[in-house]
Amino acid sequence: MAEELSRSAKKFREALNALGGAFGIVELPDSTRTAADAAKAVGCTVDQIAKSIVFRTVGEKKPVMVIASGAHRIDEKKVAALVGDEIEKADPDYVREKTGFSIGGVPPVGHSVPIPIIIDEELLRHAEIWAAAGNPHSVFKISADDLVRITNGDVRSIA
């Protein structure tokens, strides 16, 4: 574990602090880019990993984030119905522009622009979950209730 946080993890920590969250960020030597990598690195199950996936609406090109259980595949048709527009996965440049973070490390808050967030209802089954904390080597532990609170996310069935 690194003693000093990377720049992106510090940026995320500042966003958490502004929201009143006192969650510890852990930077690991191994990548947490995928849900399986993250689960292995922190010693939890894949379904306890909260993966953040950024989509772009086709019509207005607006960002939408889905925070899903690492064990689930997102049903893009369900997400499109919820946002009222077709969606497409965002490319890495768009993700960085809208969130301020790179794919594999996009945290649930602290984005460059406000992004509507949809949270996989399956995450609420767990007392604790792990999410990205600014880069592909950083994670933090949070309760599902706190995740909903800090993101103001819309909890839905999206798998």
Image (cartoon, rainbow, N blue to C red):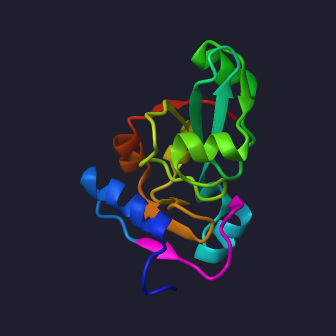
Q: Is residue 75 visible?
A: no
Residue occupying the point 40% across, 41% down: 151
Q: Is residue 34 shown in magenta? A: yes
Q: Is residue 83 above or below residue 73?
A: above
> In terms of depth relative to the viewer, which is nearer, 96 or 42?
96
Query: Residue 14 in the image: x percent, y percent?
Result: 33, 60
Q: Is residue 31 shown in magenta? A: yes
Residue occupying the point 60% across, 71% down: 137
Residue occupying the point 63% across, 43% down: 95
Query: Residue 116 in the image: x percent, y percent?
Result: 49, 30
Q: Is residue 125 above or below residue 137?
A: above
Query: Residue 100 in the image: x percent, y percent?
Result: 52, 49
The overriding secondary structure of the stretch rendered in magenta is: loop
> In terms of depth relative to the viewer, which is nearer, 30 or 70?
30
**Residue 23 sits in which quadrant?**
bottom left
**Residue 57 sits in which quadrant?**
top right
Residue occupying the point 63% across, 39% down: 54
Instruction: Please indicate whether residue 51 sits to the left or right of residue 144 in the image.
Output: right
Q: Is residue 157 above or below residue 140?
A: above
- Count of marks overlaid on the render: 0
Query: Residue 80 in the image: x percent, y percent?
Result: 67, 20
Per the rendered image, the range of residues in magenta is 25-35
Instruction: Please indicate whether residue 83 sits to the left or right of residue 110 in the image.
Output: right
* Quadrant of the drawing holding the C terminus: top right
Q: Is residue 99 visible?
A: yes
Q: Is residue 39 above or below residue 75?
A: below
